[in-house]
Image: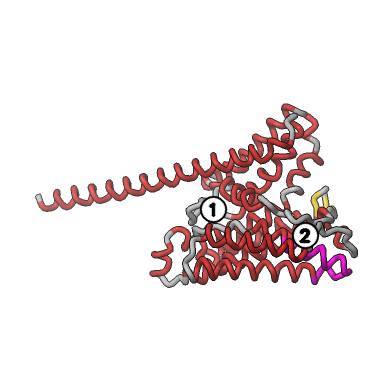
Amino acid sequence: MKNLLKARWMSSLIFLVVLFIITGIVDPSFFKYSSIIGCFNNATMYTLLAIGIAFVIMTGEIDVSIGATLGLTAAMTGLIAQQDGSVVTMIAVCIGVGALVGLVNGLGVALFGVPSLIFTLGTNGIIRGLIFLVSDGRTVENFNGTIGAYGNKVLFAEITLFYTIAIALVAIAHIVLTKTRKGKYFIAVGDNAGGANLVGINVKSTKLLAYVLCGMFAGLGGFVFASKYGQVMTVAGNGYEMTAIAACVLGGISLSGGLGNMIGAAIGAVIMASISRLLVFIGLPPTYDNTITGIMLIVIVVVDALAQRRSIEMSRRKRLLSRTATSATEGGLEA
């Protein structure tokens, strides 16, 4: 129980519960099961994006192109749906395109050593241009086939099919990161890339894999977006990268890498996805959504930086006390 309470994601869970309680006090109708479960169902896309970018952030890097990747794969999904393409084809294209974008980002950051923010920002611009080319500058709509039936399909207890799949992927990713040797490499690289390299971990391939996984999850997010909304505008996914990053940090994943887990990222995604919904119950207009999201992002980044600084100071103090104690012991023996 003590270890559970000390977990970084536990504070995020408590924060989520407090948000729900405060909203329910302001408007008791929020306590309806359908209202609460709706917050989780709305978090599907953010959960997928948070899982993907969590791999990257844990290695100490960043990816600001996932929103554009989601928009591109969503547009491609819509175009395939217009031609009566199969769902399997759509998912395969989304994952493939996402993996390709991730591979490009990974090569630029891991192999060529370009700062991740700069490289993925450039990738973001390129992908946004591709969205206009693919869609011919128009909104992709009038989907055919069965894709629309999956968007809000309820599996059980008002929980949608897509959110159930997202939670299953969170569980798989969590097990991989905590129970497998390769999975632990992501944390090791983010914690100390030089040390990880010395013990035989291939830092470059680990970061490359992180970006590929990030792109794949962004691609899946694009499929979910197209299926849920039934139309894809050229600006689809714009700003989603900031929300996903905020979800990860809010869930206890350090921006400097080496800390965090997928459970926290999933909880953070629910918090970020719930802001608009909670504002309605509180009585504030949705126009406050971006402002509150930005404030939360700044606050959690500052808190994370202060926590990192405190952790470094504590480590230094422990090393100093250890050396002092050793010196005192040696001096006593000599006397």
Mark yes or no: residue 264 visible.
no
Residue at 76% across, 32% down: 281
Is 80 magenta? The answer is yes
Residue 70's tag is none
Comes first in the chain, label 1 or label 2: 2
Q: Residue at x 47, y 72 (%)?
A: 202
| CB contact under 8 Å: marks 1 and 2 | no
Instruction: Magenta stretch: give its range.
Output: 72-89
In this picture, residue 300 sits left or right of residue 306:
right
Circle 1 SS class = loop
Whether the magenta-drawn stretch holds residue 190 is answered as no
Q: Position of residue 244 (x, y in %)?
A: 63, 51
Residue that lies at the very extreme toward the left in this rendered image: 335
Q: How is the image coloured?
A: secondary structure
User: Could you say where residue 24 lies in the image, as x and y percent from the top left?
Assistant: 73, 31
Mark 2 lies on residue: 137
Identify which residue, 56 or 311, lies in the foreground. Answer: 56
Q: Amino acid at mark 1?
A: Gly
